Image (cartoon, grey):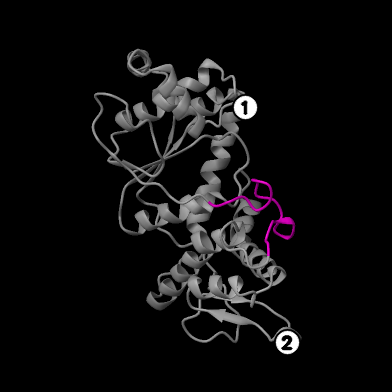
């Protein structure tokens, strides 16, 4: 399978949404290719010069490996591929020209708006972006991809495109500090904290419980589920509250926590504090590995 990422900036916690899905495939023994799309990053309205992108690719590679290591996910079937290692070849360039002669400007612009978040008057480079994604699948010989590609690309082998859920930004569409995040009391339909909890923290907590049960934890993983010391067996998340407000609440499934938030049993401040502490706990070993890696 393939996951493509363009190193246009600094990764944020939203990356965990896709990485948790990748972790499932790696645990199932699937060969996973992560495409570090340096050419795509350059074409995406020139957000980054190529020399800077080269350094970012190294950073992405080390960071993603640190994430999987911290979760005790096997990486023997994980492969990193640099886009420029094959996208600048004569064959790829010719196929790109052929594809450009088959795809309309309307379709390329529509697909580009989904992929490259283009401006109203896009550069021609951005219109190439979706076609390159389709060609990447062909040249890397993948059976399915976690992110979408140009569905109307002609004469290419059919492939599955698995779409992971998009998590709303924590504040104004960007992953900012938890305490500044938008979290309206009782609102469960447009709540980035609840979405991140459902898509990332709860699955990781279930993963750690299973690993602890099977004693399948690497020496670099010192994690435990996001629960309090007094949580009953089987719980995967704890909402930390002061005793004067009723004490902590423990949950074994997301649906119950979501229901309590909708009924305003869980206050936004308690949700923010608990999610923030869980994220800090999640990132702790990754930060340690980063600090100890000279490269």
* Residue that label 2 marks: 243
Quarter of image, res 136: top left
Mark 1 or mark 2, which is nearer the start of the sequence? 1
Quarter of image, res 131: top left
* Residue that label 1 marks: 48
Left or right position of 164 against 139: right
The residue closer to the viewer here, 149 or 291, is 149
Q: Is residue 32 above or below residue 26?
A: above
Residue 37 in percent (x, y) is at: 48, 31
Q: Secondary structure at mark 2?
A: helix
Q: Secondary structure at mark 1?
A: loop
Query: Predominant secondary structure in magenta?
Result: loop
Q: Is residue 280 above or below residue 257?
A: above
Quarter of image, res 273: bottom right
Residue 174 falls inside the magenta stretch: yes
Residue 220 in percent (x, y) is at: 52, 63
Q: Is residue 81 above or below residue 106?
A: below
């Amino acid at each position: 399978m393939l996951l493509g990422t363009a190193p246009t900036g600094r990764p944020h916690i939203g990356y965990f949404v896709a990485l948790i899905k990748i972790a499932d495939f790696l645990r199932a023994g699937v060969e996973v290719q992560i495409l570090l799309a340096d050419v795509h990053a350059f074409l995406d309205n020139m957000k980054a010069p190529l020399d800077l992108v080269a350094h970012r690719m190294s950073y992405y590679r080390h960071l993603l490996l640190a994430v999987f290591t911290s979760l005790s996910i096997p990486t023997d079937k994980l492969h990193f591929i640099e886009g420029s290692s094959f996208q600048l070849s004569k064959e790829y360039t010719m196929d790109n020209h052929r594809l450009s002669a088959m795809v309309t400007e309307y379709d390329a612009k529509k697909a580009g708006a989904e992929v490259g978040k283009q401006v109203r008057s896009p550069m021609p480079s951005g219109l190439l972006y979706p076609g390159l994604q389709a060609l990447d699948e062909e040249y890397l010989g993948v059976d399915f991809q976690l992110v979408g590609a140009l569905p109307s690309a002609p004469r290419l082998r059919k492939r599955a495109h698995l779409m992971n859920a998009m998590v709303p930004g924590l504040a104004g569409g960007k992953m900012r500090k938890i305490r500044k995040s938008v979290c309206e009391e009782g609102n469960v339909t447009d709540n980035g904290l609840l979405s991140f909890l459902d898509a990332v923290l709860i699955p990781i907590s279930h993963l750690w419980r299973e690993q602890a049960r099977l004693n399948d934890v690497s020496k670099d993983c010192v994690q435990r589920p996001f629960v309090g010391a007094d949580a009953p067996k089987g719980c995967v998340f704890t909402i930390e509250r002061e005793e004067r407000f009723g004490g902590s609440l423990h949950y074994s499934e997301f649906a119950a926590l979501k229901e309590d938030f909708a009924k305003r049993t869980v206050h936004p401040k308690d949700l923010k504090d608990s999610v923030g502490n869980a994220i800090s706990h999640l990132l702790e070993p990754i930060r340690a590995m980063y600090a100890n890696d000279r490269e």
